[in-house]
């Protein structure tokens, strides 16, 4: 019996919605007896907006200084535990993961969350991001900069926003911005600004 990752994803989305959560990412790794299903959650759009409003009206909300509220998922330990209990029960009852042994891990995506969808690049406009490309641009595949533009197909990073390392540091950087086609992005994630 093969693993139906899309069915598992749809089930996770359904359970998350009942808890006012969104599934950011879902990973299934390992083999044999060391299989791990990781689910990364954040509050849904309505709950995130309320979280941001509460944080703005109350500076003593316990938020780290300098961290934009939008980058925080708003997910609590209790949210993760409740989702894990309900989702794990459904996985077992519907036998969505064949075989007896697997570990379910549920957490927030963290401050250095992955940018997976076009909507992520729009949402985190103005944030620092680290991008790795499939093919090199000016002899470089690794870029860190501020996400200053996204037109749906191309992201633009302002490289002057951070101190560059490696090859970019050794040679004089002529371009202060780099445009990267979304199709050329191998992986991307936010960089925590604390």
Image: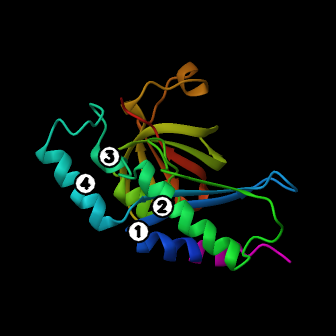
Residue 85 on the magenta segment: no
Nearer the N terminus, badge 4 or badge 3? 4
In this view, 173 is above or below 41? above
Work out how far the residue at label 1 is from the one at label 4, CA to CA, in angstroms: 15 Å
Question: Circle 2 sits on which residue?
Answer: 82
In this view, 174 is above or below 31? above
Nearer the N terminus, badge 4 or badge 2? 4
Q: Nearer the viewer, mark 4 or mark 2?
A: 2
Mark 2–mark 1 contact, CB under 8 Å?
yes
Picture coordinates of residue 178 (x, y %)? 46, 44
> For residue 177, which quarter of the picture?
top left
Mark 3 Cα-neighbour bin, 10 Å: few <14, some 14–19, many ≥20: some
Disc on res. 123? none
Question: Circle 4 sits on which residue?
Answer: 51
Residue 4 on the magenta segment: yes
Nearer the N terminus, badge 3 or badge 2? 2
Is residue 117 among what the camera can see? no
Magenta-drawn segment = 1-10
Work out how far the residue at label 3 is from the one at label 1, CA to CA, in angstroms: 29 Å
Question: Circle 3 sits on which residue?
Answer: 126
Picture coordinates of residue 10 (x, y %)? 57, 77
Disc on res. 19? 1
Judged from the image, the secondary structure of the residue bearing numbered disc 4 is helix
Q: Nearer the viewer, mark 3 or mark 1?
A: 1
Q: Nearer the viewer, mark 2 or mark 1?
A: 2
């Amino acid at each position: 019996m093969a693993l139906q990752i899309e069915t598992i994803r749809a089930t996770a989305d359904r359970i998350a919605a009942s808890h006012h959560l969104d599934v950011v990412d879902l990973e299934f790794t390992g083999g044999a007896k060391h299989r791990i299903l990781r689910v990364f959650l954040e509050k849904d759009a309505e709950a995130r907006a309320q979280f941001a409003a509460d944080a703005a009206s109350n500076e003593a909300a316990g938020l780290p200084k300098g961290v934009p509220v939008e980058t925080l998922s708003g997910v609590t330990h209790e949210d993760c535990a409740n989702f894990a209990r309900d989702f794990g029960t459904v996985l077992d009852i519907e036998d969505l993961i064949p075989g007896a042994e697997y570990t379910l891990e549920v957490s927030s995506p963290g401050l250095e969350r992955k940018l997976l969808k076009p909507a992520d690049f729009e949402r985190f406009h103005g944030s620092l991001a680290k991008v790795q490309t499939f093919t090199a641009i000016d002899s470089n595949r690794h870029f860190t900069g501020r996400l200053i533009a996204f037109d749906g197909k191309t992201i633009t990073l302002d490289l002057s926003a951070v101190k560059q390392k490696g090859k970019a540091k050794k040679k004089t950087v002529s371009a202060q911005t780099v445009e990267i086609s979304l199709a050329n992005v191998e992986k991307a994630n936010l960089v925590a600004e604390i």
